[in-house]
Structures are given as C-alpha cells and as structure tokens.
Image (tube, grey):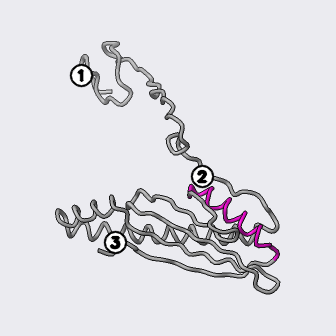
Amino acid sequence: MIKNLFTKRDRRPVAGITKEQAMQAASWYWRSRQFGVDFPSPYTLSGEQYYSKLGLRQSVIVTANEEGPNVSVDVQFSAELTDTGTVVGIVGAIVLLPVTVAVGAVSYLEYDKDAQHLINDFWSYIYAFPKNPRPPEAAQLPPWAQGQPPQPVAPPQQILRSCPKCSGAIDPDSAYCKHCGKKL
C-alpha cells in the first residue's frame, strides 16, 4: 500500500534576509500552524503535524542557503498516511468501496488545496519578513490543543414564554403549547 500521498517541493530566492532570519521566520511560521519544529542543523528545520481529517502526518523540511546576494529557501512539504489512517481506509474500502473512493477523492482534493494554501501562505510570510520581522498571527486553538483542560460551557439561556391561553410555560422552539395544545 502506498503510504506517501505526495511531496511538494519549492525553492525560491529571498532578498533582504539572512539565513538566520530565514530560519527564524520559518520556525515562527510553522510553529504558529501547530507543527512540532526541530533543527537537525543550524540552517535546516523539520516539522511534523497530524492532520486529523484524513489521518495524515504532514511533514515540512525548510533549508536556507546563501545564493549570491540572496538567501535561497527550499521547502519540502509531504503527507503520508498514518497507521490509523491506513486501517480506516482499508475498512472503508472493504465496507463501502464506491462511497469511500468518492469521499476519499473529495477529501484528498480538499487536503491538497489546504496544503497548497499553507505553502503559499508561508511564502507570503517569508517575503514580508524583512520588512516586518514579527511572529505571524497564530490560529486560535481550542483549550484541548493547548494542553489545557476544556473549560465548562454554560448552557444557552432559554427565554421562557407562556401560553396566552393557559399561561403554561412554553419551550422557545415550540409551535404548540404542551399543556393545552394551542397553536402559537
């Protein structure tokens, strides 16, 4: 079974930035997108993230090299099926092959679009970094993704109404009184 779904690679020169700044920007960007980031060497960043929609593991490798007056930034982005994703795919293929193929194709196209958007957003951030060297805005994470226990959610306040005929309490979404049957 093929586990590696795809690999995208792009290499571009970036003017007005040092290798160190390129690596700082890459680190800030991928961390803001919830990737676990590591530096196998000073000018190489590797990161991983689990993409739960399809059971994929996303990986990114960013390297920075001097290339004349510019810094060349190389991005390799790949996705592979995790063991959980493989099992779900096999079970789905056995049980509902036509539906699985259709849903899988739509999910893959959606993922490919999301991945391409992520890469394009990275390039926009890198090109703007020399003029604005700040961390990118991080997406708002739910408490469970931040390692915090979820906060209790208060139930929505219900506005109680009363029936005009019998004065009984009526649920907000009721079309009839549950006490006398009057249409509201």
Tell me the CA gap for discs 3 and 1: 50 Å
Helix, strand or loop under label 2: loop
Q: Which residue is mark 1?
A: 181
N-term-proximal mark, 2 vs 3: 3
Say which mark, if any, is on residue 70: none
Q: Nearer the viewer, mark 3 or mark 1?
A: 3
Q: CB atoms at circles 1 and 2 under 8 Å apart?
A: no
Rendered view: 126 above or below 27: below
- The rendered magenta stretch, by its main secondary structure, is classed as helix
Q: Nearer the viewer, residue 170 or 62?
A: 62
The image quarter containing residue 174 is: top left
Say which mark, if any, is on residue 105: 3
- Is residue 13 left or right of 6 when viewed as pictured? right
- Is residue 98 left or right of 147 when viewed as pictured? left
* Residue 76, horizontal then vertical, whole percent: 56, 75
Q: Amino acid at mark 1?
A: Gly
Look at the image and give the residue range highlighted in magenta.
16-35
Helix, strand or loop under label 1: loop
N-term-proximal mark, 1 vs 2: 2
Q: Amino acid at mark 2?
A: Ala
Say which mark, if any, is on residue 139: 2
Q: Nearer the viewer, residue 73 or 101?
A: 73
